[in-house]
Image: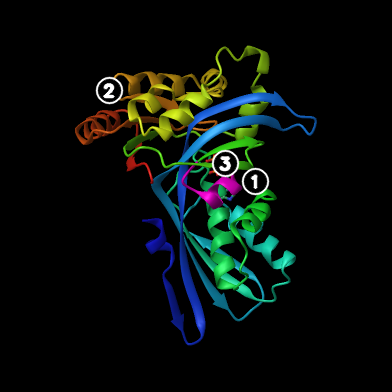
Amino acid sequence: MLKCMIDTVKMDGGMMKLWEKAPAKINLTLDVIGKRDDGYHEVEMIMTMIDLADRLSFEDIDENRIILESNSGIVPNDERNLIYKAAQILKTKYQIERGVHIVLEKNIPVAAGLAGGSSDAAAALRGLNRLWNLNLTEVELMKAGEEIGSDVPFCIVRGTALATGRGEKIKKLPPAPPGWAILAKLPIGVSTADVYGALKLEEIKEHPKTNQMIQAIEQQDFLQMSGLLANVLEEVTFRLYPEVKQLKEQLQQFGADGVLMSGSGPTVFALTNKESKMKRIYNGLRGFCKEVYAVRLLR
Ligand code: ATP
């Protein structure tokens, strides 16, 4: 499904324009198993993509510079944007003496635990690889992505995967079984660094059952997968923002197969593989949370 949407190319008097989709991810598991000497945490997480995506276009321009525009009033359009960083990295590494005009249509909530920025960066690496005919392999794109952020390599690979190390080591898994995720995001932005900073390893009560989750995915067992959802950062974010805990508790009352906070939050999501339930949860949630999305798990 992704393929046909990313391969659109338009030629306009020699100037090329192309598009990429940047889907959001959710965590099915998130475990922290240690702290490393370099200050990063050693993680073990299973992530999957959902059908909620930003859209990026890339167009040749005559000047040798990066122009970024977006419909988002929140994310910066300069060097601080991960898209801009991705373009700069490729320009420097491969001595590209060409400019590009990138337009970002932002649909993924920002600072929400959905890796929106990382997925945009990955889409920029993929898009510019095509626009500039760099012929970089997936592994080379992942290496470039690592410099931008730990979640970028996964966003290059997409699908469903186990991420280890600081999140940059990726092992592909079969696609998650078909179903819907209903997401709710409170109007707060959570800093991933703050949450990791407040995490005390010795206070983790129960670690996610990562291997069992992999088995559930391999067996395409939706109920088993939903029952194994787990994220050790929940406790930390709940402490910092008790309203996120309340939202999760409310979500649990709608009868989903499983409910979890994604990443460092504040987005919480419910899983179901029944359309009627998806609609019931979506409608129920809209009563007390402004930002609600019902989307398919991407396969
Ligand atoms: P993660 O789950 O990887 O921690 P997140 O979903 O919590 O990510 P993002 O939305 O990716 O958070 O980004 C958070 C911060 O990154 C914001 O402060 C934002 O200004 C900055 N940022 C830079 N580039 C982007 C981008 N293209 N889209 C969104 N945020 C960006």
Tag 2: amino acid: Phe
Left or right? Give the position of 280 relative to 97.
left
- What residue does disc 2 label? 254
SS for dot 3? strand
Image height check: is 33 above or below 167? Answer: above
For the residue labelled by badge 2, is the local secondary structure a helix, a strand or a loop?
loop
Label 3 CA crowd tier, 10 Å (few <14, some 14–19, many 20+): few
Image location of residue 115, percent across then percent down: 53, 43
Task: Sort mark 2 into few (<14), some (14-19) or many (20+) by Cα contacts within 10 Å.
Answer: some
> How far apart in space, not on screen, are marks 2 and 3 (Cα)?
33 Å
Q: Nearer the viewer, residue 287 or 149?
A: 149
Measuring 29% from the left and 29% from the top, which residue is drawn there? 285
The residue identified by callout 3 is: 171
Choose mark 2 or mark 3, whichever is in front.
3
- Taking the image in four quarters, ligand 1 sits in the one at top right
Are the two marked residues, 2 and 1, in contact with CB atoms closer than 8 angstroms?
Answer: no
Q: CA distance from mark 2 to mark 1?
A: 35 Å
Amino acid found under the numbered disc labelled 3: Lys
Q: Which residues are magenta?
A: 151-160
Q: Per the image, is 156 magenta? A: yes
